[in-house]
Structures are given as structure tokens and as C-alpha cells.
């Protein structure tokens, strides 16, 4: 079968054009390829795609599973989890993503049951779970911090009373005998050991993981410094010395632990703001005889009954019945489309007003399921948000270890005492202990998360802070993003001049119809409905009718009036044409065997979309939609929009974003399941909370309450956070550039090294605590009334598509 040149979907109709090579599944893909087909994707992406498609070493019987993984905190975790999983029997391949907290496993179903896969990944502080399960809560995090804080204060108090005065040549505040001093010092060692091995357990795990993965990270250097200070101090304790550096170990462990705890707490708080999102995928299907079976057991040719309000389980063909089908979650089409026997329906779409009998297609799969699969493929293979500190640690950590060992060896060779050599080497490790470097990114990110949350924005991945300040192109979905995504009455025209009576009569009849357009008209006339004789109510494919206050009222398609020989005045032709030109559905209303007026129903633009689009005047603004027709043209002609791609399917949306991202940084704003692959493929994906779970899962940030006007604040906060990260890193490197040479020159000892390290970390904490940005709330501007109410957008599919109104 021929596939689409752009998105690889089946191209049964084989749409071609004389000026473009290839065949396409739809006009939308053709238009995208015509405009962007000459843009080459990056070499890295081409290699990735070729590897994914042609170089798989696993057999065709292999299956793929996607798991969420809690406990990943850097790019080293990706390498470790992949290597550990691939060592297990029955696992062919593994791809982990720190940014998405996800791992993709390709496994042998005969050797590994799907339920056993959690055990493959879990362990060493990682907790694998199904994607729908609640995140793992580390109940020991608070207790570790409390234990570390209590024991740390106890040790530091005794340091202040006894040891610190002696370091500066003063008598201790408290005098001890030899036995009492030994007892106290032993308590130092025990409590410091508890802090290192209990409170610092996540840090130790990170160091172990970095060694196993062969990628030195910040955790490794912090661990070496803490353990070196502890080991030296304990050795001095055993030989009767009093120059201990347990305080260094305590400061190092607690500084890192507090920073990580703070970051995780903010993440949990913001993640908790998302709840009650819609579950989309169908798990069960009803056969024509009434038997309920799992979707996995559906075979090609099975006859499935789909009741009004239910989702079509799999792609197929309508065998019996006529109904309006809402395809907005899958295709982005805002207006329901009438499906009759012989028409194809997509899995995941919603039957709105009448039952259908659907024959399952040859593949027995759902379009929605394919969207889900594409989304998770993109997320699982997308590079993790590798923190700058971790990338630099692969060079910095070995360099510091070499410097510390090198200066100690040099001092020994030049005649210095072993104690002096060891202390100098330890000083280098301590003073270069990258607490400031390690805290630079997570604390700034945590502050950004908190600032975003206070502005009604949930940041799902730190990758947002890497790219949001560099966006060249802003891609906006139409339905549900820059429009309301719901049917509403936009216009009403009565030849008698009484639009209130027209809507009241129409609403009185439509309240008994099951159709989105009927609901919109009924809601408009809630307070003015006259009485209806229910015994006279009739529903047809193209409309409804009933006796209202003694007169038969007919509401529906213009051809319904002609079929019943009702008069349609010539004066209604102009308002009918005006409604169609705006991309809305015209609904004719009449009584006494004569059409009296027309009601326009459609998907209306949000009041604030123009303000948001104009706020990105330095970027190219692109509208990308599955809709087509007149409803899209008003955006094409708007001065704030640089380009419009219409009639593009979900796979085509993702491919469009990839091609745009080949030469520039792209941000995508969307809300529907059909937008999810594109959101995941964009450098920055922003979803509206009012959208679907797939969209919010795919995004880097979620705007709560569906407030489009908050989108500019996402970029302001991200830019401010990135600037704060750079400031922190600049200070951390400046500190190390000064402190390390001083340690090598033996100008400072371990105590001063610890104090310098703590001071450096404190400056990073203070800088990170500042608000990342003065992001302004655009609500006032966005909600300001415009001089002219913009016509609603939607797709002109012919009024025949509005059946049952």
C-alpha cells in the first residue's frame, strides 16, 4: 500500500500535485510538504530514524512496553537504567528519558510477562510503575533530612564549644579529660557516619550509578569529598589526633540533601495541581449481540455496537445507523461529521446522538492508540534534559581527582610529611566540592517551578528552561487552543426581526435532541423556552420538529425544509451564505410551514488569542490544525499570523513540527490528543489543562484552567530561570577558579575550604531564591473587549454534516 510522503500514513487516494514529488494521504500533508519539503532534517535525526526503522536486532514477535520511572535525577540515570535492563533475560532493547521520566522496553513476551517488567527496572532507588499509577512517594526523604539536621546540629554545637576555639589558639569553652574527649570524638564519628550513610544515601546511590554507567557526575565528587573527610578524621581519631573534619562531611551532605529535597518538594507540589484529566483510550468493546470483550480481543470483521456518548473502540466501517461523530480529540475537527453506512470511522472518536454498528477494520487497531504509541515513542527517545552541571562533571570530576592526588604525591616526593600531603589533597577535594555547581541548576529550577506554579503554570520537565528563551517559531493549534473548542451560537437572523422568539422556539425543540449543535442552541434559549408537546417530537437525519405552543416548529438543514415543501424565503440566502463563509453551521428554524430565520453555530475564537499572538511579534506564528475550509481562513488573513497549515492529521502535525525544528527552535501550544505527538516533537510543548491527558502528558508545561493568556508568562519565567542558572554556574566556576589554586598552594586548610565551600553554596541559594522573572499577567489585556466580535471558526463541511440538529 502506498504511504504518505510526509507522515507515512496509508495514502489510499494517492493525492498528488504537479509541482510536488510523492503521494499524500490528504491535502493538508500535501500543503505542508509543498511549503517545508525542501527543509532537510538534521543528520542526527535521520540516523535516529534509520536506526529505529531498520537496525532493530529484535524479532517481529517482540513487544514494546512503556513504564514511568520515579527516582531519575540526571542523564546518568538514563545510561544506568538502559544498561541494567538490557542485561536481563528477555529484554532486547531499552531507551530511558530523564526528561519524561519514562523507559521504553522491547521484550520477548514468551520469556517475560508484561507484569514482570516492573521488576526489571525497579531497584537501587528507582521505582518503575505503570503510566496510570500514582507516582512513588519516598516516605524516607523527610526522616533522612530530620535525622541529618538533628545529628548535624549536635555535632556542630560541640564543634563550636570545644574544637573551633582550639583551631584559633583559644581555650575551649568546655574542658574535657582525655577519656571524656575520646568519648565525645567517638560520638562525632558515629553521628557523622549516620548522616553520610543514612541522610546521604541518595547521594551515595548517585555516585554508585555514575561509576556503573562510566559517567562521573556531581554526586561522585560530593561523595568522595565527604567520605575522604570522614575517613581522614576517623583515622586521626584512632591515632589520638584532634584535627577532625567531620564538620566538612556534614556540611557537604546536608547542603546537597537540602537542595535536592527543596527541588523535589516543589516538583511534587506543582505536579499535584494536575488532577481529574480525562482518560481517553477505550479498554472494552460491545459486540452486536451485547457481549462485552476487551479491545485486545477484537478481530477484523467483528460487528461492534457503539451507543451515543461512547467512543468507537477501533478503526472500522459503519454497517448500520446514521450518527454525528465527534472527531475533535483525534483529528482536531471541531464540528461533528455525519457518518452513514459505508463511511469509515476512527477509533477514539465519539458517537454523539444515535447508535452505530461498526465493522472492525483489518488491523483491529485504533487511530487514538496509534497517536498514543507515536507520542510515547517520541517521549521515550527524546534526549533527557541533561543538566549543565552533570555534563561538565564528566570532565570536572576526573580533573579534581587528578589534581588532589597529584598535589599529594608531589608533596610526598618533595619531602613533606604524609599528614601534610594528605591534608593538602583533602583540601583540594573539599574546596572544589561542587556544592555550588551541583546546586546551581536544581535550586534555580526549583525557584522557576515555584514561580510558574504561582502564575498558574505547571512545568512538567526542566527541558523547558533550556529552550523556551530561544524560540523562533510559535505553532498554535486551532480547535480548543485559540478557539473555545465547543459549539456555541454565533449569530441569529430572523426575517421577522425577533431573534429572541426564533431562538426560544428552536431551543424548545432542540432540548430533546442529542447533538452538540442542538445542545448549543438549547443552552442559548434556556430562560425563554416555550412549552413543547413531547408526543409530537420527531427526530430525523437532518433535523428535528415538535409542536410548540400549538404550532409545528421545524429545525434543521435547509434541504429538510425543501423535502417537506416548506417555504424558504429568498431573503434567507444571504444570512445562510454568511454563516457558511465564517466556517459555521447554518441551522434553519421555521413554523407554519415557512422558514423564519437561521441560526449560526460554530467554534468561537478565544477573546485573548489575538493578544497572545501579537505578544510573539519577534517570532513566526504558525496555526496548525486538522480543520479545513472557511473557518481557517480568518486566521490565515490575520496580521499576527505568519502561516497556516490546515487539514493536517496527527502524524502530519508531528512531522510538520519536526521539519520546522530542523532549522529553528519551535514551541507548540495545543490541547487535544491529536496535538500530543506534535507537542512531544517540539522543542517546547505547552498544553492547556482544559485539554486531554495525552496532550498534558506530552507537554513540557501545562497552563492551568486553560488560560491561553498565560502562555507568554511561560516564556518569561523560563528565560528568567535560565538566566539564574547561568549566573549560578558563573559564580560556581569563578569560585573554583580562585579556590582550587589557593588549595594547591597550601594557602588554606580543610576547615577554611569547608567554610568557603559553604559560603559559595549559600550565595547560590540566595541568588536562586530570587524571583526568576517579573512575568506580567496578560489577563487584563487579553480580557479587554475588542471593537468587533470576531466570527467563529470551524470547518465548512456542508450543512448536511449537522444532522439531528
Image: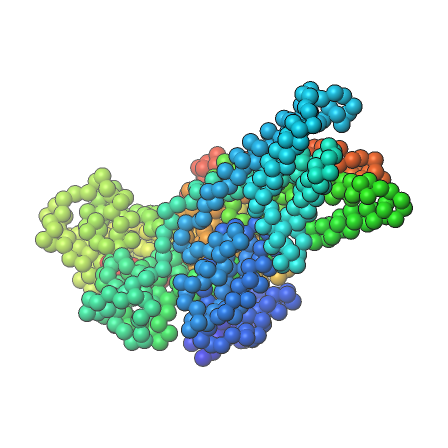
Instruction: Identify the image quadrant of residue 422.
Output: top right
Residue in view at x 24 percent, y 65 percent = 292
Q: Nearer the viewer, residue 626 or 662?
A: 662
The image shows a total of numbered marks equal to 0
**Quick check: 250 above or below 390?**
above
Instruction: Identify the image quadrant of residue 735.
Output: top right
* Display coloring: rainbow
Q: Quadrant of the C terminus?
A: bottom left
Is 233 on the left-hand or right-hand side of 662? Answer: right
Q: Is there any visible trace of residue 478 in the rendered image?
A: no
Is 169 on the left-hand or right-hand side of 288? Answer: right
Query: Where does the image place residue 660, in percent across and percent down from the top left?
Result: 58, 60
Residue in view at x 79 percent, y 49 percent = 405
Residue in view at x 52 percent, y 67 percent = 88
**Quick check: 106 above or below 790?**
below
Residue in view at x 71 percent, y 22 percent = 172
Q: Is there any visible trace of residue 546 in the rendered image?
A: yes
Q: Nearer the viewer, residue 722 or 237?
A: 237
**Quick check: 561 above or below 25?**
above
Query: Where does the image place residue 491, in percent across and percent down from the top left?
Result: 33, 47
Instruction: Identify the image quadrant of residue 756.
Output: top right
Q: Quadrant of the N terminus?
A: bottom left
Residue farthest along the bottom direction in this orientation: 1
**Quick check: 7 above or below 592?**
below
Query: Where does the image place residue 103, in percent across and percent down from the top left?
Result: 51, 60
Is 484 on the left-hand or right-hand side of 652? Answer: left
Q: Nearer the viewer, residue 409 or 762?
A: 409
Residue farthest along the right direction in this orientation: 414
Query: Where does the image place residue 12, in percent across and percent down from the top left?
Result: 42, 76
Amino acid at each position: 500500500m502506498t504511504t504518505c510522503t510526509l507522515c507515512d500514513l496509508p495514502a489510499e487516494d494517492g493525492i498528488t500535485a504537479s509541482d510536488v514529488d510523492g503521494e499524500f494521504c490528504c491535502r493538508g500533508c500535501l500543503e505542508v510538504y509543498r511549503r517545508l519539503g525542501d527543509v532537510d532534517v538534521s543528520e542526527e535525526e535521520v540516523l535516529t530514524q534509520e536506526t529505529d526503522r531498520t537496525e532493530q536486532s529484535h524479532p517481529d514477535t517482540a513487544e514494546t512496553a512503556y513504564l514511568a520511572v520515579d527516582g531519575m535525577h540526571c542523564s546518568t540515570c538514563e545510561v544506568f537504567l538502559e544498561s541494567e535492563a538490557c542485561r536481563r533475560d528477555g529484554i532486547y532493547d531499552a531507551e530511558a528519558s530523564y526528561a519524561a521520566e519514562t523507559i521504553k522496553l522491547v521484550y520477548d513476551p514468551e520469556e517475560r510477562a508484561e507484569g514482570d517488567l516492573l521488576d526489571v527496572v525497579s531497584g537501587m532507588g528507582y521505582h518503575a510503575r505503570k503510566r496510570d499509577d500514582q507516582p512513588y512517594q519516598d516516605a524516607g526523604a523527610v526522616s533522612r533530612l530530620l535525622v541529618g539536621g538533628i545529628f548535624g546540629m549536635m555535632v556542630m554545637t560541640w564543634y563550636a564549644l570545644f574544637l573551633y576555639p582550639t583551631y584559633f589558639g583559644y581555650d575551649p569553652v568546655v574542658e574535657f579529660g582525655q577519656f571524656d574527649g575520646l568519648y565525645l570524638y567517638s560520638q562525632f564519628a558515629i553521628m557523622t557516619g549516620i548522616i553520610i550513610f543514612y541522610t546521604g544515601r541518595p547521594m551515595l546511590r548517585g555516585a554508585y550509578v555514575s561509576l556503573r554507567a562510566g559517567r562521573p557526575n556531581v554526586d561522585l565528587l560530593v561523595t568522595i569529598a565527604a567520605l575522604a573527610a570522614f575517613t581522614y578524621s576517623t583515622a586521626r581519631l584512632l591515632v589520638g589526633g584532634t584535627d577532625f573534619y567531620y564538620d566538612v562531611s556534614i556540611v557537604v551532605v546536608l547542603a546537597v540533601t537540602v537542595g535536592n529535597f527543596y527541588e523535589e518538594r516543589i516538583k511534587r507540589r506543582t505536579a499535584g495541581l494536575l488532577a481529574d484529566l480525562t482518560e481517553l483510550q477505550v479498554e472494552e468493546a460491545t459486540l452486536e449481540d451485547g457481549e462485552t470483550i476487551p479491545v485486545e480481543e477484537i478481530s477484523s470483521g467483528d460487528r461492534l455496537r457503539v451507543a451515543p456518548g461512547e467512543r468507537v473502540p477501533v478503526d472500522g466501517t459503519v454497517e448500520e445507523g446514521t450518527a454525528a461523530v465527534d472527531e475533535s480529540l483525534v483529528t482536531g475537527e471541531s464540528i461533528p461529521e455525519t457518518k452513514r453506512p459505508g463511511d469509515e470511522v476512527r477509533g477514539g472518536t465519539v458517537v454523539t446522538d444515535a447508535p452505530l454498528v461498526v465493522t472492525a477494520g483489518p488491523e483491529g487497531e485504533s487511530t487514538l492508540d496509534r497517536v498514543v504509541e507515536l507520542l510515547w515513542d517520541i517521549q521515550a527517545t527524546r534526549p533527557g534534559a541533561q543538566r549543565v552541571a552533570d555534563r561538565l562533571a564528566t570532565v570536572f570530576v576526573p580533573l579534581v581527582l587528578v589534581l588532589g592526588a597529584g598535589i599529594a604525591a608531589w608533596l610526598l616526593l618533595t619531602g613533606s610529611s604524609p599528614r601534610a600531603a594528605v591534608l593538602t589533597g583533602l583540601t583540594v577535594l573539599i574546596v572544589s566540592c561542587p556544592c555550588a555547581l551541583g546546586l546551581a541548576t536544581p535550586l534555580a529550577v526549583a525557584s522557576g517551578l515555584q514561580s510558574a506554579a504561582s502564575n498558574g503554570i505547571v512545568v512538567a520537565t526542566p527541558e523547558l528552561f533550556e529552550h523556551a528563551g530561544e524560540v523562533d517559531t510559535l505553532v498554535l493549534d486551532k480547535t480548543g487552543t485559540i478557539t473555545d473548542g465547543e459549539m456555541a451560537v454565533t449569530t441569529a437572523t430572523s426575517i421577522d426581526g425577533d431573534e429572541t422568539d426564533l431562538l426560544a422556539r428552536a431551543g424548545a425543540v432542540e432540548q430533546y435532541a442529542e447533538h452538540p449543535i442542538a445542545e448549543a442552541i438549547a443552552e442559548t434559549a434556556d430562560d425563554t423556552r416555550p412549552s413543547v408537546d413531547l408526543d409530537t417530537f420527531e427526530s430525523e437525519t437532518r433535523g428535528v420538529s415538535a409542536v410548540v405552543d400549538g404550532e409545528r416548529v421545524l429545525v434543521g438543514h435547509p434541504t429538510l425544509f425543501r423535502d417537506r415543501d416548506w417555504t424558504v424565503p429568498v431573503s434567507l440566502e444571504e444570512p445562510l451564505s454568511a454563516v457558511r463563509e465564517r466556517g459555521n453551521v447554518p441551522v434553519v428554524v421555521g413554523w407554519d410551514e415557512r422558514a423564519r430565520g437561521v441560526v449560526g453555530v460554530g467554534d468561537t475564537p478565544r477573546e485573548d488569542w489575538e493578544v497572545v499572538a501579537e505578544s510573539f511579534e519577534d517570532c513566526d506564528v504558525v496555526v496548525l490544525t486538522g480543520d479545513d475550509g472557511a473557518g481557517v481562513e480568518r486566521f490565515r488573513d490575520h496580521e499576527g499570523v505568519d502561516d497556516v497549515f490546515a487539514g493536517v492529521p496527527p502524524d502530519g502535525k508531528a512531522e510538520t513540527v519536526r521539519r520546522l525544528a530542523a532549522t529553528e527552535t519551535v514551541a507548540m501550544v495545543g490541547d487535544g490528543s491529536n496535538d500530543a505527538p506534535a507537542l512531544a516533537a517540539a522543542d517546547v510543548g505547552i498544553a492547556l489543562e482544559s485539554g486531554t491527558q495525552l496532550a498534558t502528558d506530552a507537554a513540557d508545561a501545562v497552563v492551568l484552567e486553560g488560560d491561553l493568556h498565560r502562555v507568554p508568562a511561560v516564556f518569561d519565567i523560563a528565560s528568567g530561570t535560565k538566566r539564574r542558572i547561568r549566573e549560578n554556574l558563573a559564580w560556581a566556576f569563578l569560585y573554583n577558579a580562585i579556590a582550587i589554586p589557593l588549595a594547591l598552594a597550601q594557602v588554606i586548610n580543610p576547615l577554611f575550604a569547608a567554610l568557603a565551600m559553604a559560603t559559595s553554596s549559600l550565595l547560590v541559594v540566595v541568588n536562586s531564591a530570587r524571583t526568576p522573572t517579573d512575568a506580567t499577567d496578560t489577563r487584563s489585556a487579553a480580557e479587554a473587549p475588542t471593537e468587533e466580535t470576531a466570527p467563529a471558526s470551524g470547518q465548512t463541511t456542508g450543512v448536511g454534516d449537522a444532522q439531528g440538529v
